[in-house]
Amino acid sequence: MARVKLTNVKKIYDKNVVAVHDFNLDIADKEFVVFVGPSGCGKSTTLRMIAGLEEISDGTVEIDGVVVNDLQPKDRNIAMVFQNYALYPHLSVFENMAFPLRLQKMPQEEIYKRVTEAAEVLGITEYLNRKPRALSGGQRQRVAIGRAMVRDSKVFLMDEPLSNLDAKLRNQMRAEIILLRKKIDTTFVYVTHDQTEAMTLGDRIVIMKDGYIQQVGTPDEVFDMPANLFVAEFIGAPKMNTFSTRLVKENGEYYVEPFGSKIKVTGLKGKELAEKKIETRDIILGVRPEHIVLADKKGEDSIACTIQVNEMMGSELHLHVLTEDGTPIIVRVPTVNLTHEQREQMVNGHKIFITFEGKVMHFFDPETTENLL
């Protein structure tokens, strides 16, 4: 078992600066949990409290049912991978990976077995005799992961391990971490500021802001059912479009009225609004770029816009448009759905009409920013 439980954990620095507020989370054995949020939100501080690298101001951290608040990092049976690799430049790859085992005074035969097995899993066997300076960034990160692997720890902690890599290598290493997780089958706690990493790696995602948990859920849950406006705008690329408008209840049906249009709320969203007995009110409407569709012409449910920027992304276009009152909107348009005539019209300065898919809109309270559903 490698369950990690944080109960009412708080971190206070000098002058009463609170970095983490009342953090509660139960991480199951062999679960992959990702802490994500903007810089300064407290995600790395929380990870370091689990590792024992930061003192806990209040609350408890348990690993396997044992409170570890007063245990040294070496006694917590955890392994940590840092953002900057933290390799010893004068040691070979083999010796870097063997270092924690030598500290444990493990027999040489067992050290050799563990290091070579980890190197084979990570595809770095041919680099075991090299020094870190002779390796690429991705290879150095594999060495850092290998050094953590050989310890056979109960919990793997990873603090933004891919942030120093270029985009292509980051994508490759992300896939390798998914495969690695299957091979070593232990509990992972992973910190990142990149929501794409969070969505692709995590069984559950913990979204943080200003030291507070905003939402905990699976990737599907935080994407489809964001708890508040911050989560809605943070998760998804490009980010969700949001507008102040009215939600209108009319003859048992619901409509939104952005930019002079009248768009019906359909599907489960309409049923959920009715079940919660939501009446006509002001809202912040959220619509993801992929849930905006092109309309053939001006109609009651369409909005006139002018294309400002056309980003060709290969399989889709990202259209940055302005409404007639100057509100910016981002629209994702799959290129496979466009006719030749439509493609020719997707140019800067061209006027188009858009509408929103009624079954996937989101409705937020303007004051609390909480999701009404």
Image: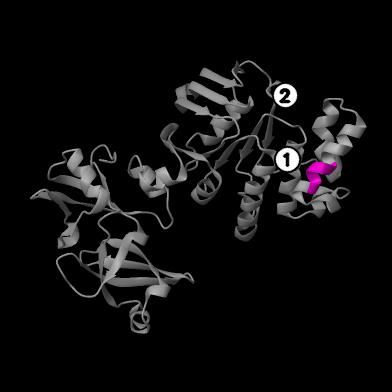
**Label 2 secondary element:** helix
* Left/right of residue 126 with respect to residue 234 in the rendered view: right
Predominant SS of the magenta segment:
helix
Rendered-image quadrant of the C terminus: top left
Can residue 123 be seen in the rendering of this structure? yes
Q: Which residue is mark 1?
A: 86
Instruction: Tell me which residue sits at (64%, 56%) in the image.
Output: 172
**Label 1 secondary element:** loop
Observer-side mark, 1 or 2, equals: 2
Can residue 117 be found in the magenta stretch?
A: yes
What kind of colouring is applied to the model shown? one colour
* Left/right of residue 371 with respect to residue 315 in the rendered view: left
* Left/right of residue 170 with respect to residue 238 in the rendered view: right
Region rendered in magenta: 116-120
Tag on residue 336?
none
Instruction: Tell me which residue sits at (63%, 24%) in the image.
Output: 52
Amino acid under label 1?
A: Ala
Residue 295 picture location, percent across and down: 25, 71
Is disc 2 surrounded by few (<14), some (14 to 19) or many (20+) residues within 10 Å? few
* Image vertical order of residue 260 relative to residue 86, above or below: below
Q: Which residue is mark 2?
A: 74
* Left/right of residue 130 with respect to residue 136 in the rendered view: right
